[in-house]
Amino acid sequence: MTGPLDGKKRIVFMGSPEFAIPALARLSREHDVAAVYTQPPRPAGRGMKEQLVPLAKYAQQLALPLRWPQSLQSTDVQDELAALNADVLVVVAYGLLLPQSVLDMPRYGCINGHASLLPRWRGAAPIQRAIAAGDTRTGMSAMCIEAGLDTGPVITTLDCEISADETAGTLHDKLAKLNADLLETVIARLPDILAQAQAQDEENAIYAPKITNAECAIDWDAPIAVTGRQIRAFSPYPGTWFDGPRGRIKIAAARPITGKAENVPAGSFLGLGEAGQMRIATIDGVLEISRLQPAGKRVMDARSFLNGHEIAPGHVFALQPDFTES
């Protein structure tokens, strides 16, 4: 078996979404990945057939041993995991809880790559929350996993800028690459690097809960700066939306403009912009929507949408969204 004497570590890697792929790619080139654990296959696509989660598909391409238990609580699953005799268990957006018995298995413990500068934005949606809050910097934290939610000691971090036009999609990709750099360094320096782990400052802890459908709704009475961050934070998924004449309209691309439209209420349709954008007044600015997706339709440019909908300048979109639809 490989181990710390030859520089290689024996790793069990746990993750599920695309975000985890760069880290697995990097670590699998340099270390012995004994197994990859992901969430089970899920129904997807038009036929709702079960499909592997993104990390499972990638692990198959690398011909790595792959497992997807429903949970890690059963004795059989834990015995199988213990038999792998891992030096370290690496977790990146796995989505399942690790019981204490699992946390105690690896020689050097369990290390998580978390997409924030802990203790800020613990929890499920750190990327989106950072953008929505107007943060100008974020990063990746390598953390020793313990029973609490992202509460373990932080070994080290790598930070990066959140640019003015950053979306959750672009920041996701930036942080995924940063995570690979971070975990490469941490795993290569085990076990000595564990000595520099520092307890998190609980007084500065902020949580990043899952995104709800309600907070994706555009509030035309909100400041335009807040709306701009909201759109970027929830792009490309789950996407912001507002109620149109025939159901919800999802915003695919938009630009906030400061400067109040005079003598019109918030939510007023102002007509088309110079490049065919759909212009809607907010309490202190204008939102120019260039691409959108009507309910049940494909994404289209705003001019094409308006060609099929009789929405005249002066029409006021609802300030209070309708949550009766799914």
Image (spheres, rainbow, N blue to C red):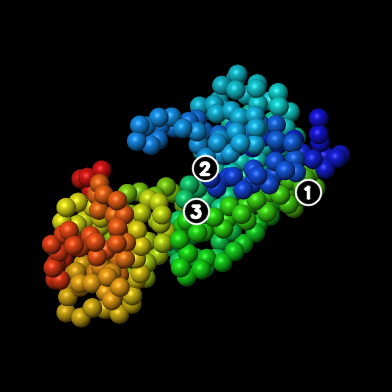
Name the residue: 16% across, 59% down. 309
**Disc 2 marks which residue?**
17
Q: Secondary structure at mark 1?
A: loop
**Disc 1 marks which residue?**
189
Residue nearest the observer in this picture, 318 or 304:
304
**Disc 3 marks which residue?**
126
- Residue that protrudes farthest toward the right in the picture: 5
Residue nearest the observer in this picture, 45 or 24:
45
Q: Around disc 3, counting alpha carbons within 10 Å, would you say few (fewer than 14), some (14 to 19), or many (20 or more)? A: many
217 relative position to 50: left or right: left
Q: Secondary structure at mark 2?
A: loop
Q: Quadrant of residue 313?
A: bottom left
Callout 2–callout 3 Cβ contact below 8 Å: no
146 is higher (above) or lower (below) than 135? above
Callout 1–callout 3 Cβ contact below 8 Å: no
Q: Around disc 1, counting alpha carbons within 10 Å, would you say few (fewer than 14), some (14 to 19), or many (20 or more)? A: few
Looking at the image, tell me whether mark 1 or mark 2 is earlier in sequence order.
Answer: 2
Three-letter residue code for mark 1? Arg
70 relative position to 302: left or right: right
Residue 43 percent coordinates (x, y): 40, 32
